[in-house]
C-alpha cells in the first residue's frame, strides 16, 4: 500500500535521475486519466523534454479533441497535436468486421505515432500509463481462443522504435491512480471519467463507418452523457453511451413517413469490466433520452435500451 504524496515525490525523483540531460521522452495522450497522470509526472520531472503527442483518429466524441487540448494546456503540457482523421477514416472505408476494424486502428495509430516521434531528436524513452492489472493480464498465459477482442494499445511500440519504457503507474490499481490524480489537482470529470475504448466510436457503429454515421452517433452520445451528468447518474454507473445500428426502420413524423437509423443506449454497472449488468435507469431518464435523441438528432427515429448482461453479451457491441 502506497503513501500517495510520497509516491509522487519518489516517482518524479526517479524519472529525473533516469533521463539524462539531452534525452527526451515521448508519450501518447488520450485525455484519459492514466495517460494524463503519467504525462504530468514525467513533465514535473523533466519539463518540456517530455513530448506529449495527441493523435486525433477521427473516432472521438463530440468536442473531444478540443477538450483534451484545453485540459493539456491548462496543465502546462505543450502537446504535439496530429489530426489523422482522414487517414483512419479512409483505411476503415468499407470495413465491416469488428476485429479488422480494431486491427486497422491499432496499426494506423502505431504508424502515425512513430512518424510523428521521428520529428524530434534525442527521443530515448516512451512513457506509458500501464497499470498493475494490465501488467498481470499481458504476462499471464492466454491461448488464442481467449482473444475475445483485440484491445487497442501501444504494446508493440517500444521495441519497434527502439525506445526504453517509463511506466510510473505499473504497480498501481485504478483507485490509487485516481488518488494521485486528485492530489495532482485534476478536475473531477477526468478523475472519475467513464472508460472509453481505444478504437473509439468505431466499435460503437456496428459495421461500416462513415462520416454521416459518426456525426449522428456523436450527437446522440453527447445527449446521453449530458443527461447522465445532469441527473447525477453518470458517476454512479460504469459506463453509459450510445451505439448506432446500421439498420433503418420506418417511422412517422407529422404525416410523413420516415426511414432512419436506430440508436441503442447501453448503460452498465461493473466492478472490473469482466462482468457487467445493465442499469435499471428510471423510466423518466430513459424517456428524456429517447425524446431528445429522436427530436434533436437528424437521421434517427427510434431508440432502444440494451438489457443484456455480460456475459454473454460484452459491454461494447463490437
Ligand atoms: P467489453 O466490450 O470487452 O469491454 O466488455 C470491457 C471494457 O473494456 C473497454 N474496451 C476497451 N478499452 N481498448 C480499450 O482501452 C479497447 O480496444 C477496448 N475495447 C473495449 C470497454 O469500454 C469496457 O470498459
Image (cartoon, rainbow, N blue to C red):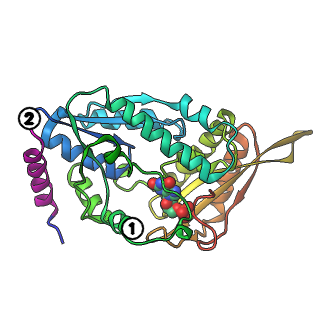
Q: Which residue is mark 2?
A: 21
Which residue shows up at 63% across the image and 58% down it?
Answer: 317
Front residue of this view, candidates 121 and 259: 121
Residue 234 appears left or right of 291: left
Residue shown at the point (26%, 46%) measured from the top left: 127
The magenta-colored residue range is 4-21
Quarter of the figure with the C terminus: bottom right
Residue 199 visible? yes
x, y percent for residue 2: 17, 68
Residue 283: give x, y in percent of width and height. 66, 64
Residue 18 belongs to magenta span: yes
Q: Quadrant of residue 271?
A: bottom left
Q: Which mark is residue 24?
A: none
Up the image or down, 59 lies above or below 136; here it is: above
Residue 186: in sight, yes or no?
A: no
Q: Circle 1 — which element?
A: helix
| Residue 33 x/y as whole percent | 34, 51
Is residue 152 rendered to the left or right of residue 221? left
Where is 177 relative to 211, above or below?
below
Which of the 4 image quarters holds residue 86? Answer: top right
Q: Is mark 1 within 8 Å of ligand 1?
A: no
Question: On the rendered structure, is 9 left or right of 276?
Answer: left
* Mark 1 lies on residue: 137
| Marks 2 and 1 in Cβ contact (< 8 Å) | no
Residue drawn at x 42%, y 51% is: 153
Amino acid at each position: 500500500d502506497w503513501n500517495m504524496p510520497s509516491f509522487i515525490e519518489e516517482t518524479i525523483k526517479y524519472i529525473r535521475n533516469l533521463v539524462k540531460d539531452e534525452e527526451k521522452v515521448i508519450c501518447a495522450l488520450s485525455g484519459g486519466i492514466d495517460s494524463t497522470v503519467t504525462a504530468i509526472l514525467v513533465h514535473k520531472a523533466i519539463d518540456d523534454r517530455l513530448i506529449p503527442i495527441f493523435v486525433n483518429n477521427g473516432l472521438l466524441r463530440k468536442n473531444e479533441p478540443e477538450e483534451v487540448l484545453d485540459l493539456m494546456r491548462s496543465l502546462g503540457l505543450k502537446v504535439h497535436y496530429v489530426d489523422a482523421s482522414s487517414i483512419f477514416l479512409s483505411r476503415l472505408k468499407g470495413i465491416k468486421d469488428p476485429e479488422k476494424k480494431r486491427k486497422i486502428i491499432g496499426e494506423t495509430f502505431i504508424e502515425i505515432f512513430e512518424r510523428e516521434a521521428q520529428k524530434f531528436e534525442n527521443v530515448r524513452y516512451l512513457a506509458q500509463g500501464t497499470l498493475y492489472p494490465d501488467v498481470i493480464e499481458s504476462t499471464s498465459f492466454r491461448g488464442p481462443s481467449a482473444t475475445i477482442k483485440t484491445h487497442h494499445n501501444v504494446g508493440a511500440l517500444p521495441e519497434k522504435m527502439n525506445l526504453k519504457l517509463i511506466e510510473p503507474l505499473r504497480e498501481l490499481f485504478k483507485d490509487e491512480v485516481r488518488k494521485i490524480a486528485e492530489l495532482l489537482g485534476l478536475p473531477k470529470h477526468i478523475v472519475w471519467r467513464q472508460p472509453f475504448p481505444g478504437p473509439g466510436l468505431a466499435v460503437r457503429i456496428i459495421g461500416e463507418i462513415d462520416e454521416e454515421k459518426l456525426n449522428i452517433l456523436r450527437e446522440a452520445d453527447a445527449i446521453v452523457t449530458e443527461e447522465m451528468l445532469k441527473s447525477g447518474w453518470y458517476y454512479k454507473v460504469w459506463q453509459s453511451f450510445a451505439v448506432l445500428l446500421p439498420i433503418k426502420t420506418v417511422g412517422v413524423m407529422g404525416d410523413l413517413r420516415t426511414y432512419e437509423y436506430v440508436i441503442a443506449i447501453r448503460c452498465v454497472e461493473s466492478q472490473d469490466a469482466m462482468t457487467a449488468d445493465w442499469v435499471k435507469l428510471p423510466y423518466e431518464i430513459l424517456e428524456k433520452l429517447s425524446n431528445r435523441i429522436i427530436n434533436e438528432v437528424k437521421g434517427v427515429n427510434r431508440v432502444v435500451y440494451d438489457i443484456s448482461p455480460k456475459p454473454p453479451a460484452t459491454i461494447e457491441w463490437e
